[in-house]
Image (cartoon, helix red, strand yellow):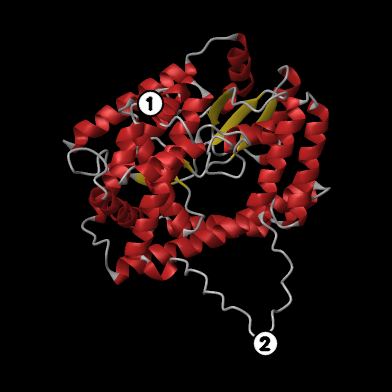
Amino acid sequence: MVLLVVVLVAGLFGYVQWTRLRSSDSYSVSVRAIVQDYRFSIPRWEVNALRSELVERLSVGHLNEDTSESKQSVLAYLDTAGHMGALEGHIERTIILSENRAEAYASVASLQEEVEELRAGQEDKRPPVERILEMQVSQMLVEEKLGWLGLALPPVAFQFTEPPYNLILSPRDEIRLRMSMTLIPSLSLETREALEITLEGELLNTSALIDGIGGFSTWPTMVIDRASLPWILNTIAHEWVHTYLIGFPLGRYYWSSSDASAINETVADIVGNEVGRKALERYYPELVPSPPPPQSPPTPAHPVPEPDPPVFGFGEEMRITRERVDILLAEGKVTETEEYMEERRQFLLENGYFIRRLNQAYFAFHGTYRTSAAAPTEDPIGPRLFRLREETPDLASFLRAVRGMRTLDDLIERVPEP
């Protein structure tokens, strides 16, 4: 039964990808010609991943997801992965911000060697950690009655791996996901920058970004391991939602429009975040953030203290940026918009938040997730989905309510007022 589900999911996924890539308009043809040597083959990855998934499941054997040993295995693995992520972030920032790239590469060579040594040491530890996390998320899906036939189907299966880079293309005069394409994960920084410049130079009215992603909904799904445990649990569940929805109109129509993509991604965010939170509370309760302590009213013996200086909030600053960008583009001020985004990128950098490229393509991609601060100012999707979730008694009812949708009109008909 499980094998049949896997085959069906793989077949449906392949069909969706084929319909997405078969476009033959001149713009798409030009894009494919420019990036032809760097395209990522999903079928080839699937064949290798399914083979390794079978081997690893047989070699790992029986595991119990709810023991102290399992918990420590997960936490130790992710602690090392987090250290690798910090090193990789430092390496990329050092190179990008340096005026002399050759000197920058030389200065971080030892750090790159350390990353490679850590990655090799993680390889044997990876399969059992993946199985433990799969079982933990699966248990939450079963308890929430998600999936088919009372089971977490499609089966939760993921691999800690390097997902492909995502090429995002938007018009310069509006924020719209015009096209996206997966590129090989081994792209160097120089190649990414060169491709972005070439695409913007050869294609009219084009803003380009080649960005990393945290997960990808193949089967098994792809997830990066250099992140916090709460984020990883959320992402495992998020990507599972995509594999589940591929059997329904909302999944199959993902690439029919930017609105359909945004509905799909936001649904996956809502469900994934709730399931991930439940898994964290069940298996890692000590990592659940504590609520802030109640504030006592001031008394004469305890006068009101001087307020602390405001803490820099990335989300709020990004929302301010998106709002201003939307206004400037609506006024037709494209060059001014791009100058403003670069000013804001530098401002974010000064406050500890590094973004390599902040442009229309950045907002077209990150704004697809309507839970993100990069979401559009006027958003007909996120508020309606949040309201629908509030009105449904559980996640299973919420998924049933949205999985048959194909368009924004379907969502508006179901939730007329946000």
The local secondary structure at tag 2 comes to loop
Q: Secondary structure at mark 1?
A: loop
Examine the image and state in which quarter residue 309 appears: bottom right
Residue 156 shows in this picture: no
Residue 300's disc is 2
Amino acid type for the residue under numbered disc 1: Met
Q: Residue at x 42, y 19 (%)?
A: 18
Q: Residue furthest front?
A: 300
Q: Is residue 285 left or right of residue 135?
A: right
Which image quarter: residue 77?
Answer: bottom left
The residue lying at 69 percent from left, 38 percent from top is 323
Residue drawn at 58 percent across, 36 percent down: 367
Q: Quadrant of the N terminus?
A: top left
Position of 185 with respect to 342 (left or right) is left
Residue 187 to residue 106: above or below? above
Identify the amino acid type marked 2: Pro
- The earlier-in-sequence mark between 1 and 2 is 2
Q: Is residue 364 above or below residue 228?
A: above
Compared across the picture, whether 136 is left or right of 41 comes to left
Q: Position of residue 117 (x, y in %)?
A: 53, 59
Are the residues at dot 1 and dot 2 in contact (C-beta closer than 8 Å)? no
Q: Position of residue 276 (x, y in %)?
A: 39, 53
Tell which of 215 and 122 is nearer to you: 215
- Compare residues 258 and 208 and report the one nearer the observer: 258
Crowding around mark 1 (Cα neighbors within 10 Å: few <14, some 14 to 19, many 20+) is: many
Please name the residue that numbered disc 1 is placed on.
Answer: 405
